[in-house]
């Protein structure tokens, strides 16, 4: 059983390794600190499970998840993040994740989730199940940022971090003009007047 842990924090990787070794003693574990390293390892061997952080230094985790699923459709990926479920969980599940858990979850729940995903099933927390039900039956109650495309959401979070249009363009491999277009769309969709309003929105909703 091969398990790949993708997280840029060494302490987190060490903790996950200990947890997995206790829950699955025969698992073979590998680590990656960046999206690039993860994709390289992914192409070299067959993986039964990838535990993937949302925030990586070179790649957004949800975008990386899409690449992984495009290259290896059957791969099972569990997202693990500091971000609350309401921020990224729905996007992650729609992109092919088998589970989304926050890093504050109890070790026992993480172990249960890992075993369930390895068994070929999804793992949905009770709070996330409630959120999924709310979205399914009352889509009009979605928060404004939940109706954004993945790329728009990504640009919004980058703006919230105080990054310039040029910096965002470099990070996302887009042209400055394209990022500016996304910014204009965000102002329109979120009914904001300027960048300051966008930054305030990300702070109010803790989007990064």
Image: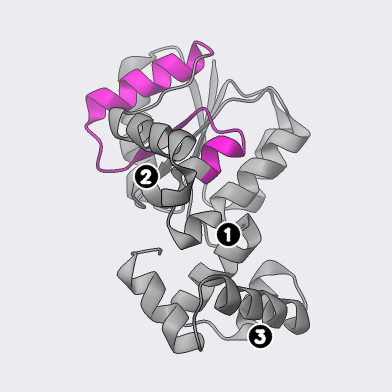
Horizontal side of 198 relative to 38 (left or right) equals: left
- Disc ID at residue 32: none
Q: Nearer the viewer, mark 2 or mark 3?
A: 2
Residue 40 visible in the picture: no
Location of the C terminus by quadrant is bottom left
Residue behind mark 2: 85
Horizontal side of 142 relative to 48 (left or right) equals: left
The image quadrant of residue 206 is bottom left
Residue behind mark 1: 148
Horizontal side of 179 relative to 134 (left or right) equals: right
Residue 9 vertical placement versus 178 (above, below): above
Residue 198 visible in the picture: yes
Question: Could you classify mark 1 by the number of other residues whose Cα lies within 10 Å: few (under 14), some (14-19), or many (20 or more)?
Answer: some
Question: Could you classify mark 2 by the number of other residues whose Cα lies within 10 Å: few (under 14), some (14-19), or many (20 or more)?
Answer: some
Q: Are marks 1 and 3 in contact (CB under 8 Å)?
A: no
Coordinates of residue 87 in the picture (x, y in percent): 41, 52
- Residue at image position (58%, 37%) is 94
Q: Nearer the viewer, residue 100 or 107?
A: 100
Coordinates of residue 71 in the picture (x, y in percent): 77, 35
Coordinates of residue 85 in the picture (x, y in percent): 37, 44
Residue behind mark 3: 166
Q: Does the magenta portion include 39? A: no
Q: CA distance from mark 2 to mark 1?
A: 16 Å
Q: Secondary structure at mark 3?
A: helix
Q: Does the magenta portion include 119? A: yes
- Residue at image position (36%, 35%) is 128
Q: CA distance from mark 1 to mark 3?
A: 21 Å
Q: Secondary structure at mark 1?
A: loop
Q: Nearer the viewer, mark 2 or mark 1?
A: 1
Magenta part of the protein: which range? Answer: 91-120
Question: Could you classify mark 3 by the number of other residues whose Cα lies within 10 Å: few (under 14), some (14-19), or many (20 or more)?
Answer: some
Task: Compare marks 2 and 3 and give the one earlier in the sequence.
Answer: 2
């Amino acid at each position: 059983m091969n398990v790949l842990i993708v997280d840029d924090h060494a302490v987190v990787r060490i903790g996950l390794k200990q947890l997995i070794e206790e829950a699955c003693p025969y698992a073979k574990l590998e680590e990656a600190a960046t999206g690039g390293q993860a994709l390289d390892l992914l192409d070299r061997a067959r993986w039964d499970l990838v535990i993937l952080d949302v925030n990586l230094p070179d790649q957004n985790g949800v975008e990386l998840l899409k690449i992984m699923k495009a290259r290896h459709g059957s791969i099972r990926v569990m997202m693990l993040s500091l971000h609350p479920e309401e921020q990224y969980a729905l996007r992650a599940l729609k992109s092919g994740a088998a589970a989304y858990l926050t890093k504050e979850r109890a070790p026992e729940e993480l172990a249960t989730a890992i075993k369930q995903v390895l068994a070929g099933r999804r793992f949905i927390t009770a709070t996330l199940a409630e959120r999924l039900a709310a979205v399914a039956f009352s889509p009009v109650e979605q928060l404004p940022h939940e109706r954004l495309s993945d790329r728009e959401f990504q640009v919004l979070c980058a703006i919230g971090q105080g990054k310039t249009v040029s910096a965002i363009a470099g990070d996302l491999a887009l042209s400055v003009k394209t990022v500016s277009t996304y910014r204009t769309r965000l102002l329109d969709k979120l009914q904001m007047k300027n960048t300051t309003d966008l930054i305030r929105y990300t702070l109010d909703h803790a989007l990064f």
